[in-house]
Image: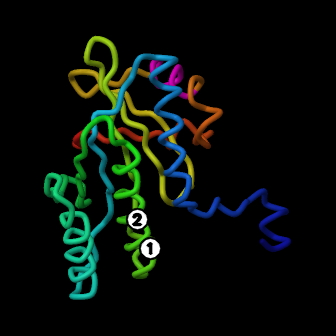
Amino acid sequence: MGFLDTLLGRSKPAKPDLDRLFALSTAALTLEAAAGFVPTGLGSVCFRAAEGGAFARLQRDVQELLDADEGPKVEISNDSYGYTWLLAKHTPDDLPALVTDLHAVNATLESGGFGPHLLCSLVGFRGPDDQRLALIYLYKRGTFYPFAPLPGDKRDNALELQIRGAVGADLPFEEDLGRWFPVWGAVF
């Protein structure tokens, strides 16, 4: 960071730390105790697919890696914004395996030179009264935030703030609430 950046109040963004994903296992225990939310066994990685054979080969390798176990196959879909979603499924009681799979996808894309194409990773939870919740890791910021959708493309902001308060000691949360963007099409 240079003198001009300091003078103008600019700061360097936090570098992504993929190992922070492993803190989701601890946060899940806190989340269940504090708010009654339990993992769904569903998690996703969202990225913008790059053109070319190298990326297609890497995406195929990632899918084969995750499909190698005897669990359900990985699903790949595209949303209306041009992002690709890779959905991994595990049993709800095997959150560590799900987080490991999400970490493997992120690390493989990053090591292949496609880190700038990563947008976020998320893990789904269900709460009392079947309320949906996702804890989302913003790759470029190295932080988490909750997303609690309601019917009709609305969100439960009060619940999101409550969740931040409940698991804020377990995960580094995004301070700028303007960056808590909704992921309406995500499956969790």
Crowdedness near tag 1: few (<14), some (14–19) or many (≥20) residues, C-alpha within 10 Å: some
Residue bearing mark 1? 110
> Which residues, given as a range, are shown in magenta?
158-164
Crowdedness near tag 2: few (<14), some (14–19) or many (≥20) residues, C-alpha within 10 Å: many
Label 1 secondary element: helix
The three-letter amino acid code for the residue at tag 2 is Asn
Residue 56 percent coordinates (x, y): 21, 80
Residue sitting at 36 percent across and 38 percent down? 182
Q: From this viewpoint, is residue 128 visible? A: yes
Label 2 secondary element: helix
Figure quadrant of residue 110 = bottom left
Asked whether, in this view, residue 156 is left or right of residue 27, the answer is left
Residue bearing mark 2? 106
The three-letter amino acid code for the residue at tag 1 is Glu
> Which colour scheme appears in the figure?
rainbow
The answer to the question of whether label 1 and label 2 lie on touching residues, with beta carbons closer than 8 A, is yes
Residue 112 percent coordinates (x, y): 40, 81
Quarter occupied by the N terminus: bottom right
Residue sitting at 48 percent across and 25 percent down? 31
Quarter occupied by the C terminus: top left
Asked whether, in this view, residue 181 is left or right of residue 179, the answer is left
Residue 12 percent coordinates (x, y): 69, 63
Look at the magenta stretch and give its main secondary structure. Answer: helix
Q: From this viewpoint, is residue 77 visible? A: no
Q: How many marks?
A: 2
Tell me, for residue 126, which label it has, or none: none
Residue sitting at 54 percent across and 36 percent down? 177
* CA–CA distance in space, label 1 to label 2: 6 Å
Figure quadrant of residue 123 = top left
Membership of 94 in magenta stretch: no
Asked whether, in this view, residue 28 is left or right of residue 42, the answer is right
Residue sitting at 52 percent across and 17 percent down? 34
